[in-house]
Amino acid sequence: GSSGSVKFPAGTVVTKKDGGSFAFYKMLAQSYDISDRTTNGRSHGVVGTLRTGIPGIDLTFSQPVTVSVNVGEQYNGKKLKIQSLDENGNQWADENLCTVSDGQCSFTVNHATYFLVSTDTSGLLPSTLPITGDHER
């Protein structure tokens, strides 16, 4: 299956940080390898990732855009934490929480970036999921 999707309401204007707009067909929505990004400030238990936007270009949206990340139906009904990392950022920021439905964690954002979805408690984690990065003791 796909890693996720991004849905734009009619009339959404997408602008680049340095000015100008761009065509929607180039919009990126794909999973990525978390180990390629800094893990500074990231919580454990990542169950889904989605990158939106265009590499190297900071994009903002004129109204909330719905992002859905496939995390699997085993998380249905559970609340998961969403974090984001800006294109050239080095610190993950808390976005909000989602309640999983039909295996999807859906939330709205006003900017394109890297997103990750994680379980807050290690007890919800599948034991097979590798945990990378530094652990706080």
Image (spheres, grey):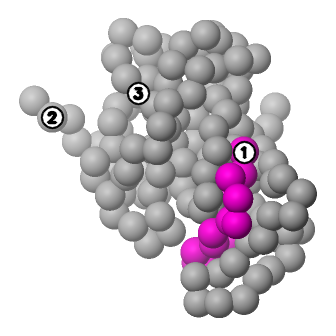
Residue tagged by mark 2? 136
Q: Quadrant of residue 70?
A: top right
Of 42 and 83, nearer the camera is 83
Badge 2 or badge 1: first in the primary sequence: 1
Residue 71 % position (x, y): 63, 26
Q: Secondary structure at mark 2?
A: loop
SS under mark 1: strand
CA distance separating discs 2 and 1: 32 Å
Q: Please say if 32 is above or below 74.
A: below
* Foreground: disc 3 or disc 1: 1
- The span from disc 3 to disc 1 (Cα, nearest Å) is 23 Å
Three-letter residue code for mark 1:
Thr
Percent position (x, y) of residue 108? 64, 44
Residue 75 magenta: no
Which residues are drawn in magenta? 51-66
* Residue holding disc 1: 66
Mark 2–mark 3 distance (CA, rounded to whole Å): 13 Å
